[in-house]
């Protein structure tokens, strides 16, 4: 059984009301989950957990400001587990001091070290790759590296969302870790000048732009392709997805940049033992399969089968760069985006 905890708006009285309401909310279920993922995207996972353990869950969806919410609730926060996406959000949650270290043999055995925090405050659950969407009509079968996106041959042919979006900041941070600041500034300038127009929209919009002929390639996350291909409610998105193919770019001396969906144990978890059981469950074969299949992501536990949609993208060879190294470079990456005027679009 899964319940939905009230949102910030439902409390209506600000931080004081949040703190006063927390003890009652803590009784809502055996595990209280604060998530930045839409409830529908994790519900099958929660149902499977309850079926296996008999423990109930309550979720609250907080798209932005999740760490601030937990911090405002303080010691009385009902939060047991935090579920969020992107190394940036995970690191922000850690830096806010609302997580606690968890040394757990099950998680450490099932989730590779590259996808876990060195301080043990967060762990990945599934991963997604930041790839190239390419026009089936106008782009031949060719290998593309992240470095080659700055090649003048792509001038006027690339679409992308804001360079300051967390997904792009993480990619630029990875480039920094591989190549250093000077080379990254040069690359980012070249990529900017290859854009068809100023960055705007989200990853799905870039696929739409390719289908409309506004550009030939774009940078986006793999799971959006799965969501578009299987979108029965908005058939036009299927058309966008059918217009593109997924190219898995690599760094010249590395693999494909990946990011994660992750989890952390809340600092003041009132149901700590149950929370740990839930986190261990997320590392099991069954949970990895469900989570990855529902969200069109890659399981992090070795040996778990991919969904047919994800498998169709080709063999992923993830970059071995630690996500902690990427997190450490995010601030500089964001500075470089502004420094080169990336979001202002190409310059002649």
Image (cartoon, rainbow, N blue to C red):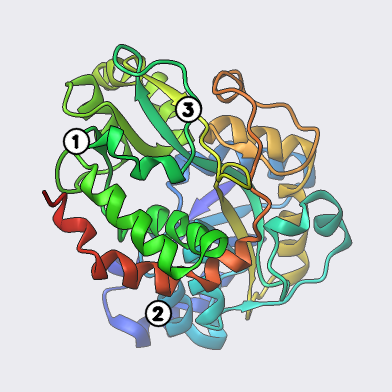
> How far apart are the two marked residues, 2 and 1, measured between alpha carbons?
50 Å
Q: Quadrant of the N terminus?
A: top right
In-image side of 291 versus 334 (left or right) = right
Left or right of 170, for residue 232? left
Q: Position of residue 79 (x, y in %)?
A: 56, 70
Residue carrying label 2 = 18
Does dot 2 land on a helix, a strand or a loop? helix
Q: Which mark is residue 247?
A: 3
Circle nearer the N terminus (2, 1) = 2
Q: Is residue 27 visible?
A: no
Q: State which quadrant residue 31 falls in.
A: bottom right
Q: Is residue 234 left or right of residue 57?
A: left
Residue visible at 32% across and 30% down in the picture: 217
N-term-proximal mark, 3 vs 1? 1
Q: Is residue 28 above or below residue 11?
A: above
Q: Nearer the viewer, mark 3 or mark 1?
A: 1
Helix, strand or loop under label 3: strand
> Of discs 3 and 2, which sits in the foreground?
3
Q: Residue at x 34, y 40 (%)?
A: 151
State the separation of the CA atoms marked 3 and 2. 46 Å
Residue 282 percent location from the top left of the image: 71, 48
């Amino acid at each position: 059984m899964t319940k939905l905890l009230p949102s910030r708006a439902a409390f209506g009285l600000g931080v004081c009301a949040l703190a006063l309401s927390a003890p009652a909310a803590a009784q809502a279920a055996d595990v209280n989950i604060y998530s930045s993922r839409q409830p529908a995207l994790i519900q099958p996972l929660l149902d499977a957990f309850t079926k296996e353990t008999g423990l109930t869950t309550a979720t609250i969806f907080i798209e932005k400001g999740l760490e601030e919410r937990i911090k405002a609730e303080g010691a009385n926060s009902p939060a047991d587990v935090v579920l969020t996406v992107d190394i940036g959000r995970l690191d922000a949650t850690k830096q806010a001091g609302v997580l606690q270290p968890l040394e757990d043999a099950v998680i450490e055995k099932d989730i590779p070290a590259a996808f876990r925090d060195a301080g043990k405050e967060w762990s990945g659950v599934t991963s997604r790759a930041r790839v190239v969407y390419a026009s089936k009509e106008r782009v031949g079968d060719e290998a593309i590296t992240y470095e080659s996106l700055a090649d003048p041959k792509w001038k006027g042919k690339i679409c992308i969302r804001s360079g300051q979006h967390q997904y792009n900041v993480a990619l630029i941070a990875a480039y920094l870790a591989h190549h250093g600041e000077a080379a990254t500034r040069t690359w980012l300038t070249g990529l900017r000048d290859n854009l068809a127009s100023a960055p705007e929209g989200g990853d799905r919009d870039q696929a739409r732009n390719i289908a409309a002929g506004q550009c030939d390639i774009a940078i986006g996350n793999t799971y959006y392709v799965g969501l578009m291909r299987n979108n029965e409610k908005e058939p036009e998105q299927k058309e966008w997805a059918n217009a593109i193919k997924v190219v898995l770019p690599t760094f010249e001396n590395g693999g494909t940049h990946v990011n994660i969906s992750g989890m952390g144990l809340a600092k003041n978890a009132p149901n700590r033992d149950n929370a740990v059981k839930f986190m261990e469950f997320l590392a099991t074969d069954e949970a990895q399969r469900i989570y990855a299949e529902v969200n069109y992501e890659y399981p992090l536990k070795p040996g778990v089968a991919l969904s047919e949609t994800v498998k169709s993208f080709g063999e992923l060879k993830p970059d071995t760069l630690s996500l902690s190294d990427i997190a450490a470079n995010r601030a500089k990456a964001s500075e470089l985006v502004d420094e080169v005027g990336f979001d202002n679009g190409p310059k002649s």
